[in-house]
Amino acid sequence: MNAHLDHRNPLVFDTHELGRRPGALQRLTRTVTAPKDFGIEGVIGVPLGAPIELDLRLESVMEGVLVTGTARASVEGECVRCLEPLHQEVAADFQELFTYPDADDRGRTAEPVDDAEDEDRLYLEDGLFDLEPVLRDAVVLALPMQPVCRETCAGLCPECGIRLDENPDHHHDAVDIRWAALQGLVGTVKDDEKDNMGGAEAGVDEKQEK
């Protein structure tokens, strides 16, 4: 369970106005700044301090408060094909139940149980809930694992590293390694023949001198 939530934190929300009557609804919009590590490290993510727009729907249910929402933000990263910087817009949908600390699965009063299943739950604390862990998970899941600047990006030349989109006619003459080996063998044979012919001519000259 969270402890000592700060109502001044823009990602902490107060549900006191919503109340605990099942079926009560509250809609909220808020723009918050991104904390650090909002993305896939070294690949793509929301820059620290960048704005995240939130549209939230809070619904009071027997067990607690069901939060449904959408987060929209601009993300930055690097194209995996051409390694150029990229900027994209991302929208992440999420839904999470924040449970009353004194309620079981049926909404009845009960003592919280410290077990593995209980650790996966998110709880309300004095009517407050922290949206940050839910938001982070939703944004990360919405990000591409292999981001590209555009779907048609041709990437880089594997031989010299030049960007192919800027040089569409760029190419290297392909050499079959088998032919290259044969050409080298032919060159070696020719060199040997020249050496042998040179030796033979030298022998003839010696005989003529005698």
Image (cartoon, grey):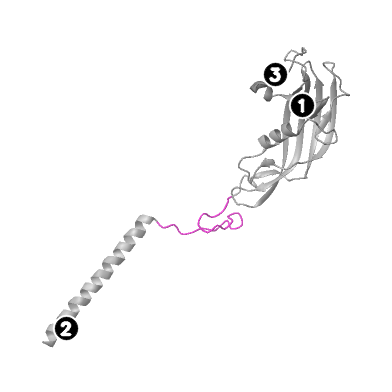
Residue displayed at 74% across by 43% down: 74
Compare marks 3 and 2 and give the one earlier in the sequence. 3
Question: Residues under labels 2 and 1: Cα distance?
Answer: 101 Å
In the rendered image, the vertical position of residue 71 relative to residue 112, given as above or below: below
Element type at marker 2? Answer: helix
Looking at the rendering, the stretch of residues picked out in magenta corresponds to 154-175
Element type at marker 1? Answer: strand
Q: Amino acid at mark 3?
A: Val
Residue 119 lies left or right of residue 108; in this view the side is left
Viewer-proximal residue, 86 or 139?
139
Which corner quadrant of the image does residue 53 belong to? top right
Viewer-proximal residue, 192 or 112?
112
State the mark number for residue 143.
none
Q: Nearer the viewer, mark 3 or mark 1?
A: 3
Specify the farthest residue to the right: 17
Q: Amino acid at mark 2?
A: Asp
**Residue at numbered disc 1:** 68
Query: Is 163 one of the magenta-colored residues?
Result: yes
Question: Residues under labels 3 and 2: Cα distance?
Answer: 107 Å
Compare marks 3 and 1 and give the one earlier in the sequence. 1
In the rendered image, the vertical position of residue 194 relative to residue 84, given as above or below: below
Which corner quadrant of the image does residue 133 belong to? top right
State the mark number for residue 113.
3
